[in-house]
Amino acid sequence: MIDFVAQPPQQVLVMIAPGFEETAVAYSIEKLRDVGLSTMLVSLTSRNVRSQHGIMFQSDKLVKDVRE
């Protein structure tokens, strides 16, 4: 088991692109948050990204705007 309390805060970037499968992304984000990790939804060219079922998502940031 990983001890997240002893480690510094971490953030996981979850990349989305047009046509992504929204259930997989939502499930992944939920599970990451359940174990205490911060998540950020990022995309390549536009903050508004349409999933494979036509649902529009807004990313937190573009990849080019993410800093360490």
Image (cartoon, rainbow, N blue to C red):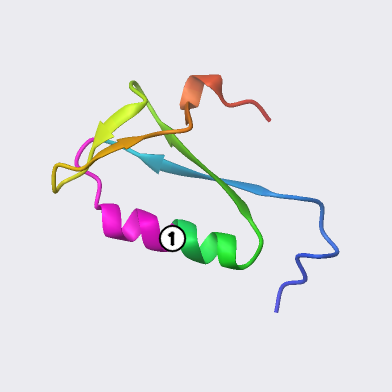
The stretch drawn in magenta includes residue 25: yes
- State which quadrant residue 5 falls in: bottom right
Residue in the picture at 47% in, 56% down? 29
Side of 35 relative to 62 (left or right):
right
Q: Give percent across and percent down for residue 31.
A: 50, 66
Q: Which residues are magenta?
A: 18-28
Which residue is nearer to you in this view: 44 or 46?
Answer: 46
Identify the residue under disc 1: 28
Secondary structure mainly formed by the magenta segment: helix
Q: Residue furthest right?
A: 6
Side of 38 relative to 18 (left or right):
right
- State which quadrant residue 44 falls in: top left
- State which quadrant residue 49 falls in: top left
Assign the N terminus to one quadrant of the image: bottom right
Residue in the picture at 39% in, 63% down? 27
38 relative to 31, above or below: above
Residue in the picture at 28% in, 52% down? 22
40 relative to 21, above or below: above
Side of 16 relative to 64 (left or right):
left
The stretch drawn in magenta includes residue 60: no
45 relative to 50, above or below: above
Q: Residue furthest bottom?
A: 1
Residue type at tag 1:
Ser
**Element at badge 1?**
helix
Q: Residues within 10 Å of mark 1 (few under 14, many from 20)?
A: some
Which residue is nearer to you in this view: 55 or 12?
Answer: 55
Assign the C terminus to one quadrant of the image: top right
